[in-house]
Amino acid sequence: MENKVHNNLVVAPSPHMLSPVGTTQIMRDVLIALAPALVVAVYVFGYRALTLTAVCIAGCVFFEFLYNKIAKKEQTIGDLSAVVTGVLIAYNLPSNLPYWMAIIGCFVAIIIVKQLFGGLGRNFANPAITARIVLFLSFTTQMTTWPLPRNQVTVDAVTGPTPLGILKEGGGELPSNLDLFLGFIGGSMGEISALALLIGGVYLVWRKVISPITPLCFIGTVAVFAALVGQDPVFHVLAGGVMLGAIFMATDYATTPISPMGKVIFGVGCGVITMLIRVYGSYSEGVSFSILLMNILTPLINNLCLKRKYGGGKKHE
């Protein structure tokens, strides 16, 4: 057999590590982890939760395909990252949001936040979080009109406040922590069931897709802060977007710190900002704003937590 000699020499800095795990496999695991929350959303809110998720996925994939086509870049829709973004956008919306508004959110996430900054891994902020904030600021009424769970819909009412809204306004009966844990409440369709999100989080940690450091620090900080201000820690952990944000968006590779200490700082920062907004702000929820603000601080956190190279002590004069 003739021996073929290859003259191509690839030179790259250390460490020289190859991993069999690629972007597509990671995104596939994230989609599997997100599936339990979708099942609960469909059960609680009906088929509209499923169709809104499908619209968001289609919108994100279309905008990514279109941008790559116009910019004459290699197509990346096969890596499933746009699909994950679409699901996360849908999870941050009320299930009755008009489809065209959701598509605007997809445009913001894929074109403005992701592609204009260079594509996957180069965006400075989480695309789904940014899309939610833009939609909230642009369509406040629609983004804060929450459909009731199907078992609570009556002739007189089909929408109602979220548990955090009830707490902020000081009127109405709060749902039990068990209802919050299982998901029989109103709110953004992907954040209602802490149980479903926990199942997904455990799966991601088991698959070593995410580190548990940031979620635990985020959730723990929320609980401690709530206890210090005399409110129910369990309620604040289970209500709103804490579980969804801590597990699926505060662990984004591109927009969160890389070192263990950086992850601790990021998680604690998210928890503190979330509770400051919930307790002292005019808006009842602060998860999205906290993650976005900490995304902006991520480069600074990475620099502060950068390990000094071996032999790189202070320079002696």
Image (spheres, helix red, strand yellow):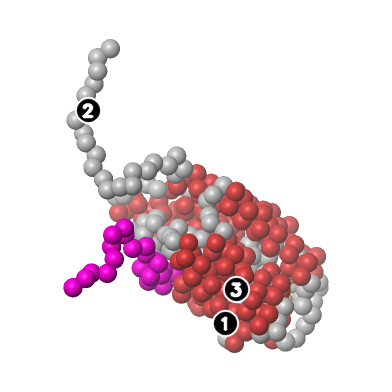
Task: Pinpoint residue 301: horizontal percent, then vertical percent.
Answer: 41, 70
The segment highlighted magenta reads 295-317
Say which of 65 and 218 sits in front: 218
Left or right: residue 77 versus residue 42 is left
The C terminus lies in which quarter of the figure? bottom left
Q: Are marks 3 and 2 in contact (CB under 8 Å)?
A: no
Q: Name the residue tied to disc 3.
A: 221
Q: Is residue 276 above or below residue 180?
A: below
Closest to the camera, between mark 3 and mark 2, is: 3
Q: Using the numbered discs, state the Cα–Cα distance from disc 3 to disc 2 in whole angstroms.
A: 55 Å
Q: Which residue is mark 2?
A: 6
Residue 232 in percent (x, y) is at 72, 78
Earlier residue among tags 1 and 3: 3
Q: Amino acid at mark 1?
A: Ile
- The residues bearing labels 1 and 3 have C-alpha atoms spaced at a distance of 14 Å
> Where residue 229 appears, x then y in whole percent?
66, 85
Residue type, mark 3 in image: Thr
Using the image, tell me which numbered label, if any, was put on residue 130. none
Q: From mark 2 to mark 1, how far is it between C-alphas?
A: 60 Å
Is residue 299 left or right of 287 when viewed as pictured?
left
Labels 3 and 2: the sequence-earlier one: 2
Q: Pointer 1: what residue?
A: 277
- Residue closest to the eye, 34 or 60: 34
Mark 2 / mark 1, whichever is N-terminal: 2
Taking the image as shown, residue 72 lies to the left or right of residue 247, namely left
Is the C-beta separation of discs 1 and 3 under 8 Å? no
Dot 3 lies on which element? helix
Q: Amino acid at mark 2?
A: His
SS for tag 2? loop
Location of the N terminus by quadrant is top left
